[in-house]
Image: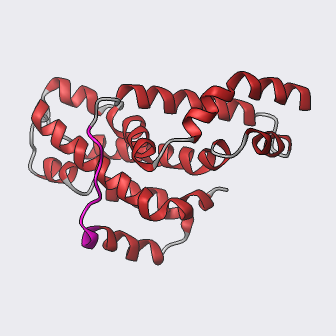
Amino acid sequence: MQETTKTFLKDLEPIIKNVGSWDNARISRAIVTAGYRNTILEDIHSNGTPITDEVREEIINELVTAIYMVSNMHPLIEQDIDNIEECILNMPEDVNEWIVTYLREMTFADACSSQWDAPSEVEKAIFEELDDELCELDSDDWPEVIANFVLAGQFSHNQENNVVLTDSVMADMNRDVHNRMFTVLEHLDDCLYEIYG
């Protein structure tokens, strides 16, 4: 098992070091791309139809999965390679598959959104509403609450007003969703990484 793990990590070391070095702007972009942009939303955009409750629910589920994936895997990836090896030896045998899946999905999402603008934090008052809500909840409930927060701005506005997702509408909505996810990571990344650690 140990020799297999060493070989596995040696093969993946450049990718692990790359993803492990990402800042919150890049991680949030990958989360948003995987859990929001590269979903059924693309069909809605292409077809020029408004967002339905069913679409929102599907995207919430995808975002929760992406947030879970990052909170579970990124603390492992950003360690020194020797520490990763030690961690893997104490984990279930299929952890190698988890790592490969994480690296593949994150690098693909990163490549898909490489032209996005750098994010900025949302207004403090907007984030404080989320922070207050999270303080009242068990951490197991955080990913779904965060996913709803991420969609609570332009996405919700467009859904409630049956706005057709033109290119310009999509650009504004993408920016808002990315800013919201970035804000969460800027303030809560340490807490997020403890949810499933």
Q: Position of residue 27 (x, y in %)?
A: 45, 43
Q: Position of residue 149 (x, y in %)?
A: 33, 59
Question: Vertical placement of 85 versus 160: above or below?
Answer: above
Please check the rendered image and state whether residue 121 is part of the magenta-colored stretch, yes or no. Answer: yes
Quarter the N terminus occupies? top right
**Residue at x 63% of width, y 50% of height:** 75
Left or right: 144 in relation to 128: right
* Rendered image quadrant of residue 180: bottom left
Dominant secondary structure, magenta: loop
- Asked if residue 52 shows in the view, the reply is no
Count of marks overlaid on the render: 0
Camera-side residue of 84 and 54: 84
- Asked if residue 131 shows in the view, the reply is yes
Please check the rendered image and state whether residue 143 is part of the magenta-colored stretch, yes or no. Answer: no
Camera-side residue of 194 and 152: 194
Q: Position of residue 117 (x, y in %)?
A: 26, 39
**Residue at x 62% of width, y 35% of height:** 17
**Residue at x 13% of width, y 30% of height:** 167
Quarter the C terminus occupies? bottom right
* Rendered image quadrant of residue 122: bottom left
Left or right: 176 in relation to 88: left
**Residue at x 90% of width, y 27% of height:** 3
The colour scheme of the drawn protein is secondary structure
Task: State the extent of the magenta-drawn residues as a range.
Answer: 117-126
Camera-side residue of 82 and 103: 82
Left or right: 100 in relation to 184: right
Question: Vertical placement of 77 versus 149: above or below?
Answer: above
Q: Position of residue 16 (x, y in %)?
A: 63, 33
Left or right: 37 in relation to 49: right
